[in-house]
Amino acid sequence: MRTLPGTGLAIVAALAIAGLSPPTVSAQEAGQTAACTARVLPAEVRANNAAYRLAITLSRPIGNAITFEPARDSGIKLAKPEDLPRAPMADESAPPPQPIGMANEGNRVTLWVSTVEAKAGTHAFTLIGPQGRCTGSLTVPPAG
């Protein structure tokens, strides 16, 4: 399809004369692309713990298959399944619990992290899912 030069400008001018405005992105559409944040409880964890349970609420769901990416220099890592606590009555042949679990609501995550090598400070992390990514932070207080 071929258009004449200045046609787009003429259409915008005609809309302006008629008192109409060109289409814009709605607030709801804009909100869908807004940054996702992760609220962590507890927000502060002590160093030297092989498995620390975090309850995370995401500002919007990002899907069920989630990857945890801590800041490289934080020393915080995803806990190993064998380091997670087992239910008192669990059969030894039962598979170990997993370090990332999703609640049915889709915006709640249980995450087990290892702080054995964690450095003091406030560290950013990212949770990545098939429908987006969320960022949060976790604080490790100084030893003492």
Image (cartoon, rainbow, N blue to C red):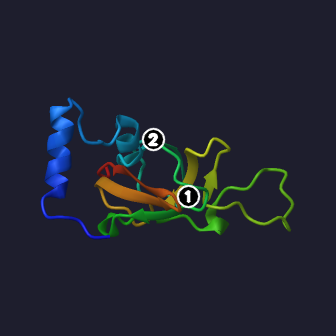
Q: Amino acid at mark 1?
A: Ala
Question: Can you give x and y, in whole percent of width and height, for residue 26 in the image?
Answer: 35, 38
Query: In the picture provided, is 32 more to the left or to the right than 89?
Result: left
Q: Residue 11 versus residue 119: which sits nearer the camera?
A: 11
* Residue depth check, mark 2 versus mark 1: number of the one nearer the observer: 2
Q: Is residue 48 visible?
A: no
Question: Can you give x and y, in whole percent of width and height, for residue 13 in the image?
Answer: 14, 43
**31 over 125 or under it: above or below:** above
Question: Can you give x and y, in whole percent of width and height, for residue 137 in the image?
Answer: 35, 50
Numbered disc 2: secondary structure: loop
Query: In the picture provided, is 111 more to the left or to the right than 48?
Result: right
- Residue at the spot of label 2: 59
Q: Amino acid at mark 2?
A: Ser
Q: Is residue 61 visible?
A: yes
Looking at the figure, which quarter contains the N terminus? bottom left
Indicate which disc residue 51 carries: 1
**127 over 54 or under it: above or below:** below
Task: Tell me whether the residue at label 2 lies in contact with that at label 1, contact meaning CB atoms closer than 8 angstroms.
Answer: no
Give the quarter of the image for residue 30: top left
Give the crowd class for mark 2: few <14, some 14-19, many >=20 residues within 10 Å.
some
Question: Can you give x and y, in whole percent of width and height, for residue 25 in the image?
Answer: 32, 43
Residue at 55%, 44% in the rendered image: 107
Residue at 51%, 59% in the rendered image: 113
Q: Residue 34 versus residue 99: which sits nearer the camera?
A: 34
Q: How far separated are the C-alphas under marks 2 and 1?
A: 25 Å
Numbered disc 1: secondary structure: loop
Give the crowd class for mark 1: few <14, some 14-19, many >=20 residues within 10 Å.
many
Between discs 2 and 1, the one toward the N terminus: 1
